[in-house]
């Protein structure tokens, strides 16, 4: 009854996140725990060589997720969801969404998964003396300029998917600083775009003869907890075409999935970190001092409060495990065994624990798409093995579970060499669903303890809801770190796995063979069309 009144009175907070395979809406209560949810499954499309989602599918998915949330609320509490205390919107970071002065989309939405901006990323890294990854919005924009794409002259607004949704709901062109740091480099002291780099880029804009400036087309940068506008009447109808949702509630600055992952794991303070492992995988480490030099494998982004973060991002993680699981489900059905998908995933992950430490010479190249961390512009998934490799199911299972983390290990080894200190590293995402297994593999890969919280399964949408709650509930002068420690995670429980030395040696040996096979990956990408 308390929750029924809480929801009916408009006190609940909503977090929405558009992930690569699922759009999820999570409603939280006074204690910050989820009380209802709704989701929508979708997939990116490869259209004319570009990984993309249509904006029509974006809105269909958001509306379906919200509709399913309303149904969940009605079924659980017997009340309609008509009012909210606050909303937060998150989505996959980076990418390219460009609009003209009339709001018309100028080119297909180019997602983080595309690896078509190598020339631009390399040149900008040299100009800025700052690593600009291929998936960043500024790399996509500069590649458009280098390609002399006709629409470049008409750009009036460039944003991310989260920024676009937020704008349509509020009329405000803004991003949280963490999300903005995946568009253009951030000056952490000012929590704004780096002015020297802005000027350097505008020189390129002027040379190309365009009338716009980069700051003029980018969203404004906001810190966590700041005013990011309110839900408009038009925005309320976009979210809920049934017309039952009232306008007027505040929104917090939109953030990317990296920022929401940090919040959901309470990893926003210095010397904390988290690993988000799903379709893609990324590690975020909040730094206490700058790195000694620029590394092309390491992205520098920020927390939702602007603290510098070293990010290792890999495009490929669990998709290849999912593909093999689907194949094994087909075998199970054909053999009349009728194992469920949950049975198959459990068998894969638990069998990985008993495989040989180095997978017995079996190497899984889980590259569905390009992987800049290991120098791949395109991916070709394949399994390679030494002639004397022991191709047991346990070794194969271990190879696909370890293979999902090998790219991340390559990048994280750089931070280890830089002597970056991490007091706590938390994992979240589908990779950690089977108890202990994902943690044990990641701990071996990174040679550091890995924890998983009981709340880790809530993920990004919950983290976004927490940011929205912070926007309306924070005390005067209370930092995000303080709010999370005092109001959200004070009694949180976590399960920690310590690194096993033999597992770590096995992962090192596996990684060495993995890197030896990279030329074969490149050759496959070149010749398999």
Image (cartoon, rainbow, N blue to C red):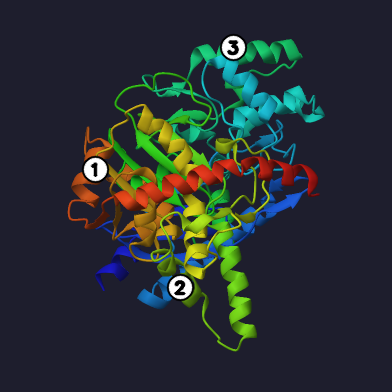
Q: What residue sits 69% from the left and 25% below the top?
A: 119
Query: Distance between the Cα atoms at labels 3 and 2?
Result: 53 Å
Identify the residue under disc 2.
Answer: 347
What SS does tag 1 mark?
helix
Does residue 265 appear to the left or right of 410 in the view shown?
left
Which residue is rendered at x = 61% and y = 20% of the image? 124
- Name the residue: 46% across, 59% down: 25
SS label for mark 2? helix
Residue 292, image quadrant: top left
Q: Residues within 10 Å of mark 3 (few under 14, many from 20)?
A: few
Which residue has dot 1 on it? 483
Distance between the alpha carbons at the discs numbered 1 and 3: 38 Å
10 Å neighbourhood of mark 2: few (<14), some, or many (≥20)?
Answer: some
Q: Which residue lies furthest to the front in this view?
A: 388
Question: In screen coordinates, is 331 left or right of 244?
Answer: right
Note whether residue 13 is visible.
no
Vertical placement of residue 305 versus 451, above or below: above
**Contact (Cβ within 8 Å) of mark 3 with mark 2:** no
Q: Earlier in the sequence, mark 2 or mark 1?
A: 2
Which marked residue is nearer to the observer: mark 3 or mark 2? 2
Residue 241 percent location from the top left of the image: 59, 61
Mark closer to the chain start, 3 or 2: 3
Disc assigned to residue 238:
none
Q: In terms of image quadrants, where is residue 126?
A: top right
| Marks 1 and 3, the one that precedes in the sequence | 3
Nearest the eye: 277 or 437:
437
Which mark is in front, 1 or 3? 3
Residue occupied by mark 3: 200
Q: How many labels does the image show?
A: 3
């Amino acid at each position: 009854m308390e929750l029924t009144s809480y929801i009916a009175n408009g006190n609940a907070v909503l977090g929405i996140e558009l992930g690569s395979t699922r759009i999820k809406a999570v409603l939280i209560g006074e204690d910050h725990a989820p009380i209802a949810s709704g989701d929508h499954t979708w997939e990116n499309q490869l259209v004319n060589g570009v990984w993309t989602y249509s904006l029509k599918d974006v809105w269909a998915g958001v509306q379906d997720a919200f509709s399913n949330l309303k149904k969940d609320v009605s079924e659980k509490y017997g009340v309609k969801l008509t009012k909210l205390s606050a909303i937060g919107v998150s989505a996959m970071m980076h990418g390219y969404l460009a609009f003209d002065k009339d709001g018309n989309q100028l080119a297909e939405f180019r997602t983080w998964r595309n690896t078509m901006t190598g020339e631009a990323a390399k040149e900008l890294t040299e100009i800025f003396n700052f690593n600009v990854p291929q998936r960043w919005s500024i790399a996509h924009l500069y590649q458009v300029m280098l390609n002399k794409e006709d629409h470049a002259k008409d750009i009036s607004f460039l944003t991310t998917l989260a920024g676009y949704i937020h704008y349509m709901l509020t009329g405000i062109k803004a991003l949280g600083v963490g999300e903005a740091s995946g568009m253009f480099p951030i000056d952490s002291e000012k929590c704004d775009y780096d002015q020297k780099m802005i000027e350097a880029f505008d020189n390129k804009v002027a040379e190309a003869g365009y009338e716009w400036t980069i700051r003029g087309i980018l969203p404004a940068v906001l810190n966590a907890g700041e005013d990011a506008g309110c839900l408009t009447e038009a925005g309320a109808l976009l979210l809920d075409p049934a017309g039952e949702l009232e306008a007027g509630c505040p929104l917090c600055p939109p953030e990317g999935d990296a920022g929401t992952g940090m919040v959901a794991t309470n990893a926003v303070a210095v010397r904390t970190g988290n690993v988000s492992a799903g379709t893609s995988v990324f590690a975020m480490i909040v730094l206490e001092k700058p790195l000694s030099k620029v590394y092309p494998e390491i992205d520098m982004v920020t927390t939702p409060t602007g603290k510098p973060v070293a990010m290792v991002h890999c495009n490929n993680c669990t998709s290849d495990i999912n593909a093999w699981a689907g194949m094994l489900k087909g075998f199970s059905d054909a053999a009349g065994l009728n194992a469920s998908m949950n049975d198959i995933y459990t068998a894969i992950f638990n069998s990985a624990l008993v495989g040989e430490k180095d997978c017995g010479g079996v190497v899984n190249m889980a590259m569905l798409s390009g992987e800049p961390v290991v120098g791949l512009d395109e991916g070709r998934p394949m399994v390679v093995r030494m002639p004397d490799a022991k191709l047991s199911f346990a070794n194969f299972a271990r190879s696909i579970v370890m293979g999902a983390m090998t790219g991340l290990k390559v990048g994280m080894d750089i931070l280890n060499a830089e002597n970056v200190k991490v007091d706590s590293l938390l994992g979240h995402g589908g990779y950690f669903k089977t108890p202990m297994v994902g943690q044990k593999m990641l701990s071996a890969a990174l040679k550091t303890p890995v924890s998983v919280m009981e709340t880790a399964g809530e993920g990004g949408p919950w983290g976004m809801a927490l940011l929205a709650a912070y926007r309306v509930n924070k005390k005067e002068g209370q930092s995000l770190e303080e709010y999370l420690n005092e109001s959200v995670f004070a009694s949180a429980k976590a399960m920690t796995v310590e690194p096993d030395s033999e597992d770590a040696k096995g992962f090192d040996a596996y990684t060495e063979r993995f890197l030896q096979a990279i030329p074969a990956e490149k050759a496959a990408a070149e010749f398999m069309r």
